[in-house]
Amino acid sequence: MTDQLIPTRRAFPADDPIFALNAEAQARKQAGEAVLNATVGALLDDAGQLVVLDSVMDLWRQLGALEVAPYAPIAGDPAFLKALVQRHWPLLASAGAACATPGGSGALALSLRNFLERGQTLLTTAPYWGPYATLAAENGIHLATAPWPGVGEGLDVAAWDAALRHLMKAQGRVMVWLNDPCHNPTGRSLSPADRAALLGLLRDASALGPVTLLLDFAYLDYTKEPGAVAAALADYAALGTEGQVLVGASLSLSKSMTLYGARCGALAFPWNGDAALQAALNQSCRGTWSNCARAPQALMLRLARDGKAQARLADEHRHWSDVLGARAVALDAALEAEGMAALHWQGGFFVTVPAGDPDATCGRLKADGVFTVPLPEGLRVGLCGLRADEAPRFASALRRAAHR
């Protein structure tokens, strides 16, 4: 043990749990085992190769030296921020208070620094993307949850109301991270009625103290219901326009552009132009990464000016949404054939399979050559890497694992 490490930094696992599971699956596959790896968090084709969108890479190859090499402004190129926000809300004339970030994770981290005090508590859904807890812990923030609706269930309004009231009473302010629509890890979105109910609760809470709603928009481009996604964005825009709740978005090029390694995104508050808010974001950027990469920002600007590239990108998103949808249908059919419930995917890269003892079930599946990610509520399954023809093997292994 390195003596120079302070005591609170000495007890971490050697690797991120999801990456460790993926590494184990890859090692066993390379050793000749017939491994089914559903831990992957990036989109793979049916040959197991990383999907890289051609429309995006064509734009990347067009970038000139001065679109790549110079520093970007500390808060990001204002034109980039506007273009990225307008991908989600085309009628907005401004990005509002906003800054470029290294992917969506950077946006989430900056929100913790600016809207909660150390020792306070963030509210999100259960289940949630595991690194939410890591991001919170690294910023001295606790994490509380309220339930995401199960299949065929409505929002637990009482639980959400109680959680909001408890936090407001305890700390005088509330921030909610909401990964909707196309929720990771369930693959389901809030219904219009559930969304309206939740936004009503946030309005009520805002009468008691400051409320921030941060929308995590990692997966919106991969959905079987683009109309429902557009309607959700309109609902959130309406809440943001009202001004009672501070509504912001964590935006990322990682999944939408298959630019995972470019590490580019933004934290944006499109309906708030407060100079103090912008100055706080600038300060946070300078005090962490200073500036983000210029190249992906330049690519976003090229895309915004190129209607043909936008049409090609939309076609690619539709194609891969169809692939994900076919995988989800195949998995639901396989689960039902084994006497288990369908999962009813609506969008994103993942679904969550219920499991009574997720860790034990995950271990039994690993012994069968099937890798998933255990959550408190079940097993996260990456449709982004699970082929449709692998669904029967997965469902059969899950049934055996659940009954051992």
Image (cartoon, rainbow, N blue to C red):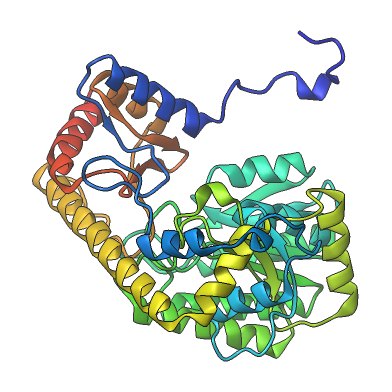
| Res. 11 visible in picture | yes
- Quadrant for the C terminus, please: top left
Position of 97 relative to 183 (above/below)? below
Can you give x and y, in whole percent of width and height, for residue 48 in the image? Answer: 27, 40
| Res. 196 visible in picture | no
The residue lying furthest to the front in this view is: 65
Number of marks: 0
Tell me: 311 left or right of 167: left
The residue lying furthest to the left in this view is: 337
Q: Quadrant of residue 226?
A: bottom left
- In terms of depth relative to the viewer, which is nearer, 215 or 69? 69
- In terms of depth relative to the viewer, which is nearer, 274 or 49? 49
Tell me: 228 left or right of 327: right
Residue at image location 80% in from the left, 72% down from the top: 210
Tell me: 15 left or right of 94: left
Tell me: 288 left or right of 196: right
Can you give x and y, in whole percent of width and height, for residue 245 in the image? Answer: 72, 78
Residue at image location 32% in from the left, 60% down from the top: 151
Residue at image location 65% in from the left, 72% down from the top: 80
- In terms of depth relative to the viewer, which is nearer, 225 or 404? 225
Position of 347 relative to 25 (above/below)? below
Residue at image location 49% in from the left, 65% down from the top: 156
Can you give x and y, in whole percent of width and height, for residue 254 in the image? Answer: 51, 55
- Quadrant for the N terminus, please: top right
Can you give x and y, in whole percent of width and height, for residue 114 in the image? Answer: 82, 60
